[in-house]
Amino acid sequence: MVVGHDVLGGLFAIDGGALGVAPGEVCYFGPDTLTWDGFGGGYSAFLMAAMGGALDVVFEGLRWPGWQDEVASLALSQSISLYPPPS
């Protein structure tokens, strides 16, 4: 079940068993790795991390100078497409 999207097209989802991480764990599908990686906790841990700023670690290699200004002007239904993908 998808529980979040990021502006670069990544997805946060709860592993129901098909993602290969651990059932009940929130996983992240990143545009840089194109794989599902475990977040290290369930949905409540994900919410606490999202509200407390701990997701900065997830996005560390995906941010560039001035990203806040570019993202601030987007509607919630919009995203940014990068080519080549981040690496």
Image: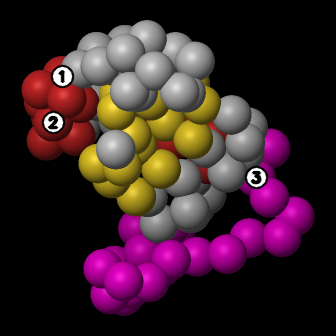
SS of the residue at dot 2? helix
Q: Which residues are magenta?
A: 66-87
Residue beneath disc 1: 45
Specify the amino acid type for callout 1: Ala
Marks 2/1: CA–CA distance: 5 Å
- Whether residue 69 is visible here, answered yes or no, is no
Residue 21 appears left or right of 31: left
Residue beneath disc 3: 86
How did the renderer colour the structure?
secondary structure
Marks 1/3: CA–CA distance: 26 Å
**Magenta stretch holds residue 78:** yes
**What residue is at 83 percent from the left and 70 percent from the top?**
83
Specify the amino acid type for callout 3: Pro
Residue beneath disc 2: 47
Position of 84 relative to 72 (above/below): above
Specify the amino acid type for callout 2: Leu
Residue 81 appears left or right of 63: right
SS of the residue at dot 3? loop
Magenta stretch prevailing secondary structure: loop
Crowding at dot 2, Cα within 10 Å, few <14 / some 14-19 / many 20+, comes out as few
Marks 2/3: CA–CA distance: 25 Å
